Amino acid sequence: MTVVLLTSSLTMVAAVVAAQAGRQSASARWLGVTILLGVVFAALHLNEWLRMIGEGWRLFRNPMGGSVLFGATFFGVTGLHLLHVICGVIVIAVIAIGFRRGRFDAGHVETTGLYWHFVDLVWMFVFPLVYLMNVRP
Amino acid sequence: MTNITPRHPPGMRLYVVVWIGLLLIVGIEVSLTYLQLPGPRLLASLLVLAFIEAGIVVMYFMHLKYERPSLFWSLIPTLIFVLVLMDHFWPDALRLMHQRLPLP
């Protein structure tokens, strides 16, 4: 999931670079790849959620016997992040279509890129603090 | 729309190098997790690496490195303000630690 999101940041940068160089179709293609990676991230995330719910995890239930607050923290933090990813995917799709039709310019693509990188940046803290800190080797 | 194109946009090669660097940092984070470090030390290490990652993303992917210096320096008071705000929440976080429900 982390690799997918980091890669989507790189494809977003490629879209911005192409847009600034006036290569409209290349920029739209890179935006398409970014959308695809965003969808893959969301699908992996939802799959993880469904598996955890299947194992008995709930907002206030911890099947492993630890703190019951873990479920609320995990679903709350990762859910808010996932919501931002889904919103980002929708916005990138709108910008990609508008940019292809000439309704938006390179500035719009870059501003959308800043949002997407911020979503990636937040994950850089969610991943170690929520996932890695709870690994039991 | 305001033009926010960086003054000296770098090429894709640099971005790919940055991306590989970020993947390496993620790899180090995962490796650290399996070293069985004490909790506070692991937390500190992961936070330092996360801040380095965030800094790289802000400087390169978000182009802060190529913006006017005044924009960079204007972020410092904002960062201090956020840290001061967070400092007000630590006592509450510590209070919550003592309010954990007993294990079943």
Image: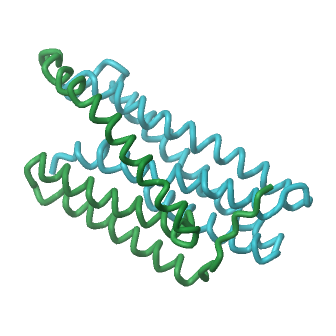
Chain colours: A cyan, B green
B77 horizontally vs A30: left or right: left
- Quadrant location, the N terminus of chain A: bottom left
Figure check: A79 above or below B95: below
Residue A60 placement (x, y as % from top left): 32, 18
Residue B12 placement (x, y as % from top left): 60, 80
Question: Which residue occupies 12% across, 15% down?
Answer: B102
B103 horizontally vs A71: left or right: left
**Picture quadrant of residue A97:** bottom right
Residue nearest the observer in this picture, B71 or B3: B71
Figure check: A2 above or below A50: below
Residue nearest the observer in this picture, B47 or A77: B47
B31 horizontally vs A44: left or right: left
Question: Which residue occupies 10% across, 54% down?
Answer: B36
Question: Which residue occupies 43% across, 56% down?
Answer: A2
Residue nearest the observer in this picture, A104 or B28: A104
Residue A37 placement (x, y as % from top left): 59, 57
Question: Which residue occupies 85% across, 56% down?
Answer: A104
Residue A38 placement (x, y as % from top left): 59, 52
A8 horizontally vs B42: left or right: right
**Picture quadrant of residue B68:** bottom right
